[in-house]
Image (tube, rainbow, N blue to C red):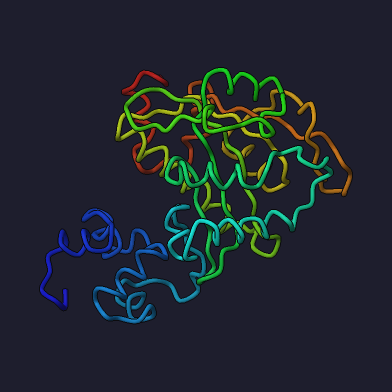
Amino acid sequence: MSKGWKQGELARRIGASERTIRRWEHGKTLPRLHHIKGLQRELGFTGEEIQDALGAHPQVRYSVCSQSQAAKICGSFEAYDDVRGRIINEFPLPEEPGEYGADEKWLSLLKMSPESGGAVVFQGDTIVGYWASLAVSENTYRAILDGKNVNKTLSGDDVIIPFVPGVYKMYFVDLFLLTAHANPTTRKLIVMNFLAFLLTSAEAGIFFERVAANITSIEMKRVCEHLGFKKVVDHQVHRFFNEKGDAVPAIIYELDIGTSADTLFKFDNIGLRQLYADKGSID
């Protein structure tokens, strides 16, 4: 390193692990946007110099970071939430006023659990998509599977912050990608980021054995089916526009990581399967 730092010191300064830095140096992964900004800050290099040093392909355009990091990049949670809202607005829904609850509520839930699941997709410095999830109580999860309008009544009391080891249930709330950026690269980034989130959680003893998703976008439907989610029921209230532009019922999907392991873990090259096997969730 140009400043004489060991990997551990650089890792500490930019919020990465030594293992992550080694993977960059060996060309196994590329830095995410917030790491690149950290490297620029600490080493005084340009983004292009950092990519050249790490052997990054010049055509790599997309990166992923957490929602809390996106809020820092945007300047505040409010600014990030505004961007998130503009992305959602590209996909109008046939809904009644107040059907999903107040915008202020969703902002408060974002502030409450920005690291509890979800990521933001960037092209350069521009946000082009995101996914978000929440760990929820047993009663709330059951209501989701029954197709009830949980979104309207969901509050902080229904959300669990998974600080301690245990088995939790996840509500996969949103996945939106701007149409111009819905491609194999961004879909792969989302899938791999979802697996990485499950891995980081499992390493801390936090397991999500069941995940429910409220499908209100074509992109979310594609990604969830790709990961092994199965349809449970049509939503009692929500609707969305399908590929033909017809208003159809939203769909409640569920991922049972125990029974859907073969589908989910076919993407796994990071050791996630072994952690779930050690937990006894899969064979």
The correct choice, above or below, for 109 with respect to 184 in the image is: above
Residue at 76% across / 35% down in the picture? 250
In this picture, is 167 found above or below 100?
above
Q: Would residue 133 be found to the left or right of residue 32 on screen?
A: right
* Quarter residue 139 falls in: top right
Residue at image location 33% in from the left, 30% down from the top: 274
Locate the N terminus and report the quarter of the image it occupies.
bottom left
Point 45% across, 41% down: residue:
195
Give the camera-side residue of 142 and 201: 142
Q: Position of residue 171 (x, y in %)?
A: 56, 32
Residue 280's quadrant in the figure?
A: top left
In the foreground, 27 or 224:
224
Image quarter of the C terminus: top left
Q: Is residue 121 above or below residue 192?
A: below
* Picture coordinates of residue 251, whole percent (x, y): 73, 32
Q: Is residue 72 above or below residue 40?
A: above
